[in-house]
Image (tube, grey):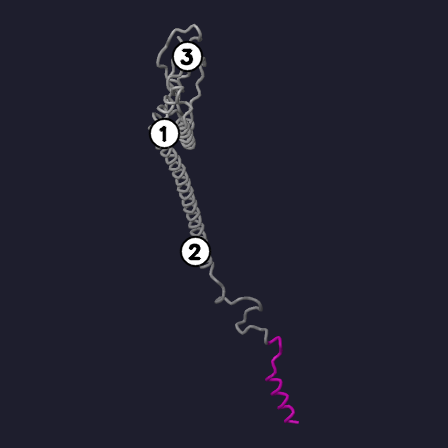
Amino acid sequence: MKDDLTTDGEARGVAVSDKDKLKPTDGSAPGEASEAEQTPPEEEAIVQKVGEQQVADLEAQLEEAKTQAAEYLDGWQRARAELANFKKRMEREKAQWEEDIRGEVLSSLLEVLDDFDRAMDNLPDEIADHDWVDGIRLIHRKLWAQLEALGLREIEVEEGQPFDPRFHEAVTHEQSDDHEEGAVIEVLRKGYMINDRVLRHAMVRVAS
């Protein structure tokens, strides 16, 4: 009997209920944090202020990066546009330089064309049918074909058409009963153009 009581007593002394396990040892109510675990309001304010400052700094850095990126993009676009304009200007200058060179070469050959024209216009009838004359005509045609390929073309002038200072050079002004005032009487020397530019004006007589 004594042993049973001792055993029961020891059992009752050692046994711990589930409710006892949930009770805090410091005497605080269940679910409440201890004073040591709670963050003081001052520290919370400091943490919040530091966080806000960091966010503000990051936003400022982001805006600065955006501004710098926009400046870089603008500079790149300007440089690209300047390069494109430079290339176009160089192409125009190159084309103009090539045309000027062609103009100088063709101008030096105009007197040769004049000599051919005078020779063909003043051929004596007795030699007009000779084979060597046909050879000269062939050379003249080949020369003219080569010059046309370089952009040379003759300024077309007809007798009686109005004088045009853009294409004609008046050598004389003469009274004429057969032509109206300001009309071309005769072409004394042919004029030529290279593409759309006058290389040499046609020399003409003009009725006054």
Residue sitting at 35 percent across and 12 percent down? 172
Which range is magenta?
A: 1-20
Most common SS among magenta residues: helix
Q: Which secondary structure lies at badge 1?
A: helix
Identify the image quadrant of the N terminus: bottom right
Inter-mark Cα distance, 1 to 3:
27 Å
- Check whether the beta carbons of the residues at disc 2 and disc 1 lie within 8 A of each other: no
Question: Front-most of 182 and 155?
Answer: 155
Q: Which secondary structure lies at badge 3?
A: strand
Q: Position of residue 124 (x, y in %)?
A: 38, 19
Q: Please tell me in which quadrant of the rendered image residue 116 appears.
A: top left
Q: Which residue is mark 1?
A: 106
Residue sitting at 39 percent across and 6 percent down? 175
Seen as rendered, the residue at the extreme right is 1
Residue sitting at 43 percent across and 18 percent down? 157
Q: Which residue is mark 3?
A: 185
Identify the image quadrant of the C terminus: top left
Q: Does 15 appear in magenta?
A: yes
Question: Front-most of 128 and 159?
Answer: 128
Q: Position of residue 183 (x, y in %)?
A: 43, 12
